[in-house]
Image: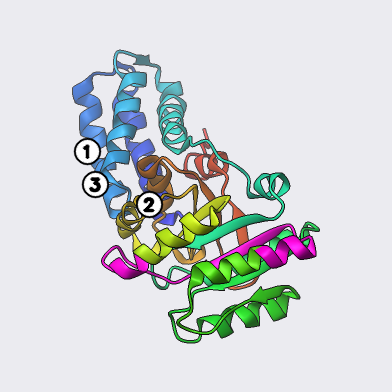
Amino acid sequence: MFDSLKDSVSSFSEKAKETVAEKEVTEEMLEDLLWDLEQQLLKSNVAVDVIDRLKQDMKEELVGESVPRRKAGAVVESALEDAVRDVLQQESTELEKVVEKEKPALILFMGFNGSGKTTTAAKVAHMLKDRDYGPVMAAGDTFRSASIEQLQEHAENLGVECISHEYGSDPAAVIYDAMEHAKKEGKDAVLADTAGRAHSDRNLMDELEKIVEVNEPDMKLLVVDALAGNDVLEQAEAYDRIGFDALVLTKADIDEKGGAALSLGYVTGKPILYLGTGQGYQDLERFDAESLVERLVDSED
């Protein structure tokens, strides 16, 4: 992940070292440099709003500064690092803390068709079980063919219970029953799958709104596909009506561009909690903004 972004940042840094060395940095000088960076970032699926913020932050830090040649690389990379860090800063709540606070906690997984909600719910179940929590899975997708069987198979593989009804039944009732079962059995969390839907699926969006109203989730996770590029921002916007607390970015292991990770938090104002990095249950990586900054901007000077 981030190979394209990394190449863009490296190319910019090398050019900037020569341009700003031994000179007082002017806005015009920086504009020329940032134009090249902007084009590269756009190719890496970084949102325009994010690019504008990066450019503004770098101008504020560099314009008017005189940069010695021997320090040019470090100064420019430090400014870019600060700008990226600023974009990525979003207040985050750990899922485990939600599970600790509420017994049982209801975690709702939402997203477009094919974004990876069901697999992500299974990965979270594996993570919680590995940390000695007792999860229950709820088959709230009663719409898509084979969705219930898919979740049941994950639950069986993981050794956790899966509460389900028949296809076509009310998903709000399925999740309600799962919560009642979890309370009775002293479980720690209910992980509720839901049907994939787009903003144009008015009936399904109404259904999701009902799920939220009836069950009052403790955390709503929007699951988005990194390979969707800037479409992930449209997906997030489509779920503004329902509201969500955090994001999970799936297929991060095969996303060479990486722009979605840089854009999502800033544009939505919500944190990215996890990256899906493979098909295995263990392939769920906690998103670390500081680690991303270091991977993008790692001076070798």
Along the viewing direction, whichever of 109 and 287 lies nearer the viewer: 109
- The residue segment tinted magenta is 180-205
Along the viewing direction, whichever of 161 and 62 lies nearer the viewer: 161
Would residue 142 be seen by someone viewing this image from the given angle? yes
Residue 236 location (% of width, % of height): 36, 54
Residue 175 higher or lower than 84, as above or below: below
- Secondary structure state at the residue bearing disc 3: helix
Residue at (57%, 43%) from the top-left corner? 291
- Secondary structure state at the residue bearing disc 2: helix
Measure the alpha-carbon separation of dots 1 and 3. Answer: 6 Å
Residue at (33%, 53%) from the top-left corner? 233
Residue 273 location (% of width, % of height): 55, 50
Q: Which amino acid, mark 2? A: Gly
Q: Which residue is mark 1?
A: 35
Residue 206 location (% of width, % of height): 35, 63
Is residue 73 covered in magenta? no
Q: Which amino acid, mark 3? A: Gln
Q: Is 39 positioned to the left or the right of 104 in the image? A: left
Nearer the camera: disc 2 or disc 3 = 2
Q: How is the image coloured?
A: rainbow
Residue 30 higher or lower than 171, as above or below: above
- Secondary structure state at the residue bearing disc 1: helix
Q: Which amino acid, mark 1? A: Trp
Residue at (33%, 17%) from the top-left corner? 22
Instruction: Tell me whether circle 1 and circle 3 mark residues in contact (CB < 8 Å).
Output: yes
Residue at (45%, 43%) from the top-left corner? 270
Q: Which residue is mark 3?
A: 39
